[in-house]
Amino acid sequence: MIITLSKGADAARVRAALADLGLWTREFSGSLGGTQFYVRAHSGAADHSAILAVPGVADLAEPASDHPLVDALGPEVEIGGVRIGGAAAPVLFAGPCSIESEDQIHTVARRLAALGTRFLRGGAFKPRTSPYEFQGLGREALRWMRAAADESGLLVVTEALSESSLDDVAETADLIQIGSRNMHNSPLLTAAGRTGRPVLVKRGMAATVEEWLSAGEYCLAHGAPAVVFCERGIRSFDDGTRNLLDLAAVALLRHSHGVPVIVDPSHGLGRRDLILPLSRAAIAAGAAGVIVEVHPHPGAALSDGPQAISYEAVSELVAALDTDQPAALAGKS
Ligand code: PEP
Ligand code: MN
């Protein structure tokens, strides 16, 4: 939003009055002359009449947003009967980093369903830093995952790494995951939108919040019925944790942009001992749920073992976050 000041207005006073309304401004000299304020994206929502009533404010204008469909999305979406965001209880997305065998994914699905997980996660196509690391088991793993999820009453979220596997992923997944490395891949975002499936848009590891929202816009503009955003940590100077889990961005998405956002503390932290406290913090910041990596034998995991948690830890997480539960587990009929 752009606010134009009246001639001779005291800019500092106007800025202070706008800050009282929750608006954070940056001054610039507009092409029309005089003083104007640009209202920054992390400002709160304020009534236009309240802004115009501030002494010294002459006019305001709302330039078109780069992501109108995201802006219209609203705080809550429903995927496969599960409500995500808004007033809904936190949703747990859990599963292995990679699908490693048919038996593994069935076992994990059964255990996680019994603990209150709603979405089974797991990669069949893995974006690995090294070409010598495990790359995932591909299409066959997708079939195992779908069967495992169906057997246990779970929904499926899995990553589409490229356009070549997108049709198979779309056939399998209730929610198509676009990974951090692909958040800027507009042809893939476009193609994911065209499948007509909801999309989980993970934040690029060096993406601004606006770029992240625009990635969601791509999916919606090309036909996705819904998007959910996922904060998974950004690159920082500090290697104390794998990434810097940006919970401020989570609060921005939830409270300023009003869109559903979940948090992936597994990739954000890279270590299992901090998953519980940062999951709590994520929910406090406004996350609609968390997505965590779980492995029956973390030490033997083919990828991301150090950040995988045990079933016991999942159970603690569910209790701590007071997550959404399927009727059967919650004791409802
Ligand atoms: C994942 O969730 O499996 C994954 C690879 O995460 P990211 O894209 O956030 O690195
Ligand atoms: Mn992983």
Image (cartoon, rainbow, N blue to C red):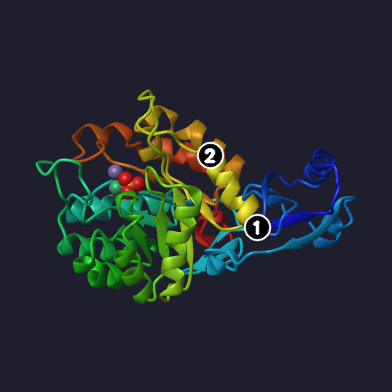
Instruction: Please give the label number shown on residue 31.
Output: 1
* Kind of residue sitting beneath label 1: Ser
Q: Residue at x 20, y 45 (%)?
A: 128
Question: Left or right: 325 with respect to 97?
Answer: right
Q: Residue furthest left?
A: 132
Considering only vertical position in the picture, is 241 above or below 121?
A: above
Q: Nearer the viewer, residue 267 or 246?
A: 246
Disc with the residue nearer the chain's start (2 vs 1): 1
Q: Who's the residue at 61% across and 40% down the image?
A: 284
Image: 170 above or below 209: below
Q: Is residue 20 above or below residue 81?
A: above
Q: Amino acid at mark 2?
A: Leu
One can see residue 211 in this view: yes
- Relative to residue 164, is residue 271 drawn left or right? right
- Indicate left or right for 108 with 278 as reference: left
Where is mark 2, residue-wise?
247
Q: For numbered disc 1, what is the local secondary structure?
A: loop
Q: Position of residue 112 (x, y in %)?
A: 38, 50
